């Protein structure tokens, strides 16, 4: 988003809000002046100022405290910050991108997140589903990771076996893309083969991949014969769910749109 925006020539500053202690977050983001607290031996520019003309990415925004939320709201409203220990407002020109794994509107109803701050941040909202709900992305991600990690570890790995790819696609990925990246890196670093196999995955790395395979069957509520074609699996899931496409898509581990597209491509009425 930053690299394709008019601000691509400006800085891109990343902040993990969950990693910043409560007593330091204001200083880190807004800066401070010398002598404002113990250890403040010089003036310091905060990350909002450092991102001037560019973008600041506030990761884990749902974890900041209510007191800091109020201060952040003022920054968004006034487009200015005050360094800790100073009362001189400083205008800032930044694009703010925020991310969280929490439902902020639900958190607002519980009193954990300010609703007015949510609507200030939510100028445009992009929902990124967990990896288990977009399994079509897994082969693309694996190919990308193989390329970059082969260069990193100076290996020549050009692909994965169908058995391993089937296991990757059928895994539930509680750790999402980070977990997939770690699995691929482990295989590239430890396996001497040009093509990664299921045996290249270290024992205990993710035990579900080591479970007995039932062919290429995705998880559905209806039994599907081992080695069944994708068309057979989709029809079985649709029949088991009384042809409710949305429900069948969930049991197949894909989005409703993906299932519609596959049905059209496979000629399923």
Image (tube, helix red, strand yellow):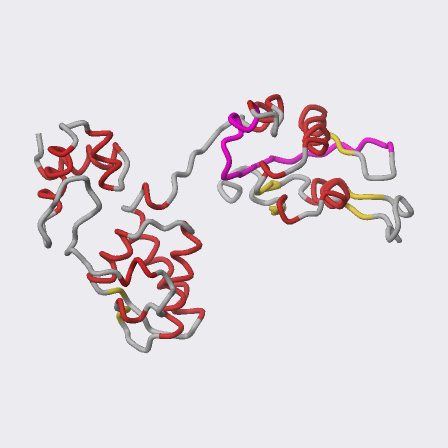
On screen, residue 106 versus residue 261, left or right, reads: right
- Taking the spot 86% from the left edge, 32% from the top edge, the residue there is 88
Extreme residue toward the right, this view: 35
Magenta stretch: give its range. Answer: 87-108
- Taking the spot 38% from the left edge, 60% from the top edge, the residue there is 145
Instruction: Give x and y (percent) for residue 199.
Output: 27, 71
Instruction: Give x and y (percent) for residue 143.
Output: 32, 58
On screen, residue 242 versus residue 250, left or right, reads: left
- Taking the spot 75% from the left edge, 46% from the top edge, the residue there is 24
Q: Is residue 59 magenta?
A: no
Could you say which is closer to the camera, residue 5 or residue 178? Answer: 178
> Where, by quadrant of the figure, is residue 185 drawn?
bottom left
Number of labels in the image equals 0
> Where, by quadrant of the figure, is residue 168 drawn?
bottom left
> Where, by quadrant of the figure, is residue 167 drawn?
bottom left
On screen, residue 187 versus residue 41, left or right, reads: left
On screen, residue 221 versus residue 152, left or right, reads: left
In the rendered view of the protein, which quadrant contains the C terminus?
top left
Instruction: Give x and y (percent) for residue 262.
Output: 17, 38
Extreme residue toward the bottom, this view: 192
- Taking the spot 28% from the left edge, 63% from the top edge, the residue there is 210
């Amino acid at each position: 988003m930053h690299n394709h925006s008019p601000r691509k020539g400006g800085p891109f500053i990343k902040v993990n809000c969950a990693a910043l202690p409560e007593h330091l977050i204001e200083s880190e983001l807004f800066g401070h002046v010398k002598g404002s607290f113990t250890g403040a031996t010089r003036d310091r520019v905060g990350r909002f100022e450092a991102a001037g003309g560019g973008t600041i990415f506030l990761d884990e925004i749902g974890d900041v405290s209510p007191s800091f939320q109020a201060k952040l709201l003022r920054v968004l409203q006034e487009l200015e910050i005050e360094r800790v220990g100073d009362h001189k407002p400083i205008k800032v020109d930044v694009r703010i991108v925020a991310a969280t794994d929490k439902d902020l509107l639900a958190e607002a109803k519980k009193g954990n997140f300010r609703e007015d701050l949510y609507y200030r941040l939510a100028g445009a909202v992009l929902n990124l589903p967990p990896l288990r709900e977009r399994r079509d992305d897994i082969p693309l991600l694996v190919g990308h990771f193989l390329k970059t990690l082969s260069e990193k570890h100076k290996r020549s790995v050009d692909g994965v076996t169908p058995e391993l790819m089937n296991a990757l696609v059928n895994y539930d990925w509680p750790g999402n893309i980070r977990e997939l990246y770690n699995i691929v890196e482990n295989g590239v670093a430890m396996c001497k083969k040009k093509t990664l196999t299921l045996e290249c995955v270290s024992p205990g790395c993710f035990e579900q991949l080591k479970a007995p395979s039932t062919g290429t069957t995705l998880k559905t509520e209806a039994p599907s014969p081992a080695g069944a074609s994708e068309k057979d699996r989709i029809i079985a899931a649709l029949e088991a769910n009384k042809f409710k496409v949305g429900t069948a898509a969930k049991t197949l581990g894909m989005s409703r749109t993906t299932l519609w597209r596959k049905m059209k491509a496979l000629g399923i009425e």
